[in-house]
Image (cartoon, rainbow, N blue to C red):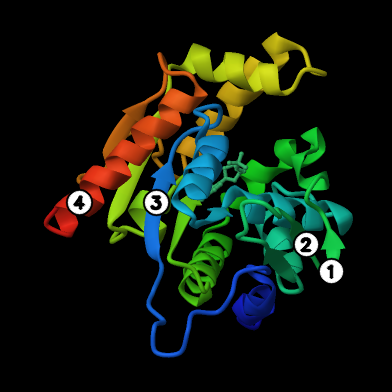
C-alpha cells in the first residue's frame, strides 16, 4: 500500500480562525504535552489550560476515534489490523485546534459527536493497537502542530510525552486514582450504568496499556495527581507546572 500520510494531512483546515503569524515572526509553537489515562480529566483540563494560555489544543485521541468510526462505516472488524490498515488508505482526516470552535471531520463529514458514541469507544482500542497506523498518525500530529500559526499548542494523548513529543519543553502526566477516574467517567456518561462504565474503563486501560505505558511518568515528565483536586484546581496545578518549567527554561 502507498504511504497514507499525505491524505491525512490537511493543514489548511487545521486551525480556522487563527491568523497566520506576521512575516518574519513565524516560529514553531511551544508544545505543552499532556499524557494520562481515561477519566484523569486530561481532555477537559488540557482544553481549559490551552484556553487560559491562549494556545491551540490538539486532542490526539480524536484521530484514533475518527479512524475507528471510518472503519465501522466501511463495515470493518476493528480487531483485524490488516483490514484497519486497508481503510486507513483513504482516511481523510481534519481537526480544529481552536479551543472555542471544536470539530473533527472525516472526508468532509462532521464526526465531532459521532466519534464519542459507545460503538466507537468500544472499537477504538483495536485501531490504536496497529503499529503502522500509530506511526503515520504520530507524524500527522507533529505536522499539524508545526504548521499551526499559534504561539503554543497543548497536545493531549497517551503517548504524547514519550513518543510523539519527547522533546516538548513542558511534559505532564495527569493521573488520578482508578476509582476516581471511573466515577468521573460515569458522571460524564449519565445515560450509562456506573458499574458498566467502570468495567469498560478498566478494560480499555488494560487493552491500551499493552500498547503505551500511560500510567508511569517517563524521566523529565511532571506528575499532576488530580485525585484530590477539583477541575479548577487541576487546571491551576497544570498551569503552575507550565509556568515553572517555562520560567526555568527562560531563566526566570
Ligand atoms: O483519549 P480518548 O479516550 O479519546 O482516546 C481514544 C483511544 O485512542 C483510546 O483507546 C486511547 C487511544 N489513544 C492512543 O492510543 N494514543 C493517543 N495519543 C491518544 C489516544
Residue placed at 78% from the left, 50% from the top? 112
Q: What mark, if any, has residue 191 been given in the picture?
A: none
Disc 1 target residue: 108
Label pair 1/2, CB-CB below 8 angstroms: yes
Camera-nearest residue between 82 and 197: 197
Residue 181 lies, in percent from the top left, at 53, 20
**Going by the image, does 7 lie left or right of 35?**
right
70 versus 212 height, above or below: below
Give the number of callouts: 4
Mark with earlier residue (4, 1): 1
Disc 3 target residue: 33
Image quadrant where residue 251 sits: bottom left
Disc 4 versus disc 2: nearer the observer: 4
| Label 4 – label 3 distance at C-alpha | 17 Å
208 versus 15 height, above or below: above
Residue 102 lies, in percent from the top left, at 70, 53
| Label 1 – label 2 distance at C-alpha | 5 Å
Dot 1 crowding, Cα within 10 Å, few <14, some 14–19, many 20+ = few
Q: What is the residue that sits farthest to the front in this orientation?
A: 22
Q: What mark, if any, has residue 105 been given in the picture?
A: 2
| Label 4 – label 2 distance at C-alpha | 37 Å
Residue placed at 71% from the left, 67% from the top? 93
Q: What mark, if any, has residue 247 been given in the picture?
A: 4
Mark with earlier residue (4, 3): 3
Say which quadrant the N terminus sits in. bottom right
Residue 4 lies, in percent from the top left, at 64, 77
Dot 4 crowding, Cα within 10 Å, few <14, some 14–19, many 20+ = few
Q: Is residue 139 visible?
A: yes
Amino acid at each position: 500500500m502507498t504511504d497514507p500520510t499525505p491524505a491525512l494531512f490537511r493543514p489548511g483546515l487545521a486551525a480556522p480562525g487563527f491568523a497566520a503569524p506576521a512575516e518574519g515572526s513565524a516560529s514553531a509553537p511551544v508544545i505543552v504535552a499532556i499524557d494520562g489515562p481515561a477519566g484523569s480529566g486530561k481532555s477537559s483540563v488540557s482544553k481549559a489550560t490551552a484556553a487560559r494560555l491562549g494556545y491551540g489544543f490538539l486532542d490526539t485521541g480524536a484521530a484514533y476515534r475518527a479512524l475507528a468510526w471510518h472503519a465501522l462505516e466501511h463495515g470493518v472488524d476493528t480487531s483485524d489490523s490488516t483490514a484497519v490498515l486497508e481503510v486507513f488508505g483513504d482516511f481523510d482526516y481534519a481537526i480544529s485546534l481552536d479551543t472555542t470552535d471544536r470539530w473533527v471531520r472525516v472526508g468532509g463529514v462532521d464526526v465531532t459527536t459521532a466519534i464519542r458514541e459507545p460503538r466507537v469507544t468500544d472499537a477504538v482500542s483495536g485501531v490504536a493497537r496497529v503499529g503502522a497506523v500509530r506511526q503515520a498518525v504520530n507524524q500527522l500530529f507533529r505536522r499539524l502542530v508545526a504548521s499551526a500559526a499559534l504561539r503554543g499548542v497543548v497536545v493531549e494523548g497517551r503517548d504524547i510525552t514519550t513518543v510523539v513529543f519527547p522533546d516538548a519543553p513542558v511534559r505532564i502526566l495527569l493521573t488520578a486514582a482508578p476509582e476516581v477516574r471511573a466515577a468521573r467517567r460515569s458522571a460524564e456518561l449519565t445515560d450509562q450504568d456506573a458499574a458498566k462504565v467502570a468495567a469498560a474503563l478498566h478494560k480499555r486501560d488494560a487493552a491500551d496499556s499493552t500498547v503505551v505505558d500511560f500510567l508511569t511518568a517517563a524521566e523529565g515528565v511532571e506528575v499532576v495527581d488530580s485525585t484530590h483536586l477539583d477541575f479548577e484546581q487541576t487546571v491551576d496545578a497544570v498551569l503552575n507546572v507550565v509556568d515553572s518549567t517555562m520560567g526555568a527554561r527562560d531563566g526566570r
